[in-house]
Image (spheres, helix red, strand yellow):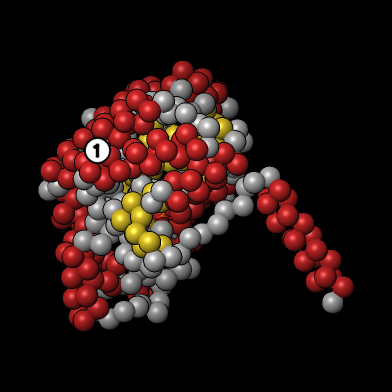
Amino acid sequence: MTEITAFLGHVTGLLGAIEADGLMKRERPITSAQGTHVKVGGRTLLNLCANNYLGLADDPRLIAAARVAMDTHGYGMASVRFICGTQDLHRALEARIAAYLGMDDSILFAACFDANGGLFEPLLGPEDAIVSDALNHASIIDGVRLCKARRYRYETGDVADLERVLAQARADGARFVMVATDGVFSMDGTFAPLAEIRTACDRHGALLMVDDCHATGFVGPQGRGTPARAGVRADILTGTLGKALGGALGGYIAGPQAVIDLLRQRARPYLFSNALPPPVVAAGLAAIDIAEGADDLRKTLADNAAYWRAGLSDLGFTLLPGDHPIVPVMLGEAVLAQRMAAELFERGVYVAGFFFPVVPKGRARIRTQMNARLTRADLDTGLAAFAAAGRASGVI
Ligand SMILES: *Cc1c(COP(=O)(O)O)cnc(C)c1O
């Protein structure tokens, strides 16, 4: 009794500190499907913060594929893969992902968070080294922590620093060295310099792992991601079905056959967590078919991103430079990002403030994201709202 009272006092204190720092995140329930517009509290808002790059989250073809799969394969699996959780659909999707990405095979996880969490530990041991970009996604950081390999970090996107760290790892006697990087850094919308990173890896005999969550489906030829965009090979790729490829959930690792075979035996989030539900797997197959042939959507997405970036820039907002459909509007303090998001909400635009711990303190922002289904009229409405909200909160 007294233990729980003291403990809850401690937890309540932590919550109070989060609130006092202006770092409390509040969720707004959406009552419609995810789309270019969403319903919140009876209002329809322009949605500029989903990872729904190709607009597939409410696509009738994905919904139809999911329905058919529920009729033929049921709703849930009630099993991990190796007991009785593998259907023909799961293997079909793994083969499809591998063929799309030009890899031998792939392995599905409940999420890319799990894929990254389970990737390193079975493959590398204390004799080995992982060299990780300082800005990598939290799931890579956690996956690296769970692995016994020695850990090295390099300044984000800084190939000279990467070279230095690779030389250090070699000097320390590492057996195998694996460089791990996001293909696109999700908070900044910047690309990792993969061509230079690949060259550095080759020079030091290192393997290259790329997390392409914010690229697969819409970056590079046929949407095959950042290695295809840079014209280089990644040895191991991870990605998600939860962003451009339909936005439901599910992650994967794609790579050489022996790597995938070993992960099927040893990756803990794969061995100890449920198989993906059939409707999600079937819609994933449909999403890849659509994405592979979606040059029109990729073109519209790039045009939208260029138009949106120029529009915000002309209004006087500070953006991070780049040409990815992630367009971060830099605001500095968390309180200002929250205020700006609230002002935009009042003006019919749904965005979220991003602040510590997802970005460094003092680097708060509103991360806007483009979608191929947004029209010019939608973007003009969005720009007008940003102009008004920016003035109301003193940003411009
Ligand atoms: C979103 C994201 C993840 C996590 O993907 P989920 O499938 O949602 O778990 C992992 N890595 C990066 C770079 C991401 O952006």
**Height in image: 122 above or below 309?**
below
Residue 183 in percent (x, y) is at 36, 37
Q: What amino acid is labelled 1 in the image?
A: Asn
Q: Is residue 198 above or below residue 101?
A: above
Q: x%, y% of residue 140? A: 49, 45
Towards the viewer: 280 or 265: 280
Residue 73 relative to residue 312: left or right? left
Q: Note whether 162 is above or below 23 in the view shown.
A: above
Residue sitting at x 33%, y 42%: 382
In the picture provided, is 204 more to the left or to the right than 290? right
Q: Is residue 114 visible?
A: yes
Residue 55 in the image, given as x and y percentages of width and height: 25, 53
Q: Is residue 260 above or below residue 356?
A: below
Quadrant in the picture for residue 325: top left
Q: Residue at x 50, y 48 (%)?
A: 342
Disc 1 is placed on an element classified as helix
In this view, the residue farthest toward the right is 2
Callout 1 crowding tier (Cα within 10 Å): few <14, some 14–19, many ≥20: many
